[in-house]
């Protein structure tokens, strides 16, 4: 028969798993999934999705970016001058913007009256019959409780704005003769748009630069006149031609795009 002290020692060692063994590790509690976003937007990217971003500056510049699964459209306007660029956006870029808007509950953001000035930003999301919008312009602003979520939605869209630079540059100018004329220049840039560089806010002229990934022909279509505008098409060689200037011929009563030759 074991002495009482020895028996007690054996019992303690057996209860601890034996001499020299480490105490059992605590079992971690199961980690709960993060709370789902407060939104009714579908988790999968809608097929007929359109995200529209607008930025209106105090100097009158108006920038509009439309994102869809079929492609993107970038528009710039100052006064009576308008430029519209159609180009392809990487699919993952559109998905990242939609995911951000869904995560921030864009469909839950309320816009309320505010003393804001007329310039500012606006966002709109639509698919099928669904329409959601929020803005911080035209004397409106997101409700205070939604201000940070709206700012993060803006940042997600602005991250895909075409703002890069490259060695292939196309100048787009409006001649002073167009001061009283309204015209729109449409360009399909395909997959080659790197960025658009806008004129400084202090610049009174209407001009901008297109930065492309490679030298290539660009087809330009100029629409001018009302109520039924006429259309004129020209082709320039990006990488060799310097750009295009829109001029008005008073004798013929029409605007036309003039290809700018390379600088000597």
Image: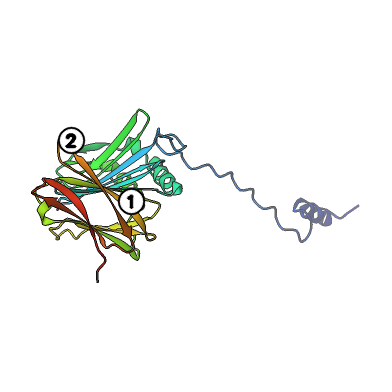
Direction from residue 97 to residue 186 in the image, left or right: left
Colour scheme of the picture? rainbow
Instruction: Name the element at disc 2.
Output: loop
Query: How many circles with numbers are drawn on the protein?
Result: 2
- Quarter of the figure with residue 10: bottom right
Q: CA distance from mark 1 to mark 2?
A: 38 Å
| Disc number placed over residue 228 in the picture, else none | 2
In the image, is residue 67 above or below residue 205?
Answer: above
Coordinates of residue 248 in the picture (x, y in percent): 13, 51
Within-10-Å neighbours for mark 2: few <14, some 14–19, many 20+:
few
The residue at the point 10 percent across, 51 percent down is 179
Coordinates of residue 83 in the picture (x, y in percent): 24, 49
Judging depth in this view, the residue of 152 and 20 nearest the camera is: 152
Instruction: Name the element at disc 1.
Output: helix
Which badge, 1 or 2, is on the more N-terminal residue? 1
Judging depth in this view, the residue of 220 and 39 nearest the camera is: 220
Direction from residue 2 to residue 215 in the image, left or right: left
Furthest toward the right, the residue is: 1
In the image, is residue 89 above or below residue 105?
Answer: below
Direction from residue 121 to residue 161 in the image, left or right: right
The residue at the point 14 percent across, 43 percent down is 115
Judging depth in this view, the residue of 4 and 223 nearest the camera is: 223
| Disc number placed over residue 155 in the picture, else none | 1
């Amino acid at each position: 028969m074991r002495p009482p002290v020895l028996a007690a020692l054996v019992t303690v060692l057996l209860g601890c798993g034996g001499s020299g063994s480490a105490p059992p590790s605590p079992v971690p509690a199961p980690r709960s999934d993060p709370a789902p976003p407060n939104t009714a937007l579908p988790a999968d990217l809608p097929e007929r999705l359109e995200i529209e971003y607008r930025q209106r500056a105090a100097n009158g510049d108006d920038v509009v970016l439309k994102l869809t699964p079929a492609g993107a459209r970038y528009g710039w306007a100052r006064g009576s001058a308008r430029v519209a660029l159609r180009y392809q956006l990487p699919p993952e870029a559109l998905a990242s913007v939609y995911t951000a808007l869904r995560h921030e509950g864009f469909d839950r953001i309320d816009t309320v009256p505010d003393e804001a000035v007329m310039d500012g930003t606006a966002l709109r999301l639509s698919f099928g019959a669904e329409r959601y919008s929020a803005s911080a312009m035209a004397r409106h602003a997101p409700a205070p409780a939604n201000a940070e979520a709206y700012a993060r939605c803006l940042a997600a869209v602005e991250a895909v704005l075409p703002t890069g630079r490259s060695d292939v540059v196309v100048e787009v100018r409006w001649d002073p003769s167009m001061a009283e004329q309204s015209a729109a220049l449409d360009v399909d840039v395909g997959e080659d748009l790197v960025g658009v560089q806008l004129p400084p806010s202090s610049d009174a002229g209407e001009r901008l630069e297109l930065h492309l990934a490679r030298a290539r022909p660009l087809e330009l279509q100029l629409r001018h006149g009302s109520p039924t505008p006429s259309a004129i098409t020209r082709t320039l060689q990006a990488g060799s031609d310097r750009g295009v200037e829109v001029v008005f011929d008073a004798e013929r009563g029409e605007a036309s795009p003039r290809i700018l030759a390379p600088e000597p």
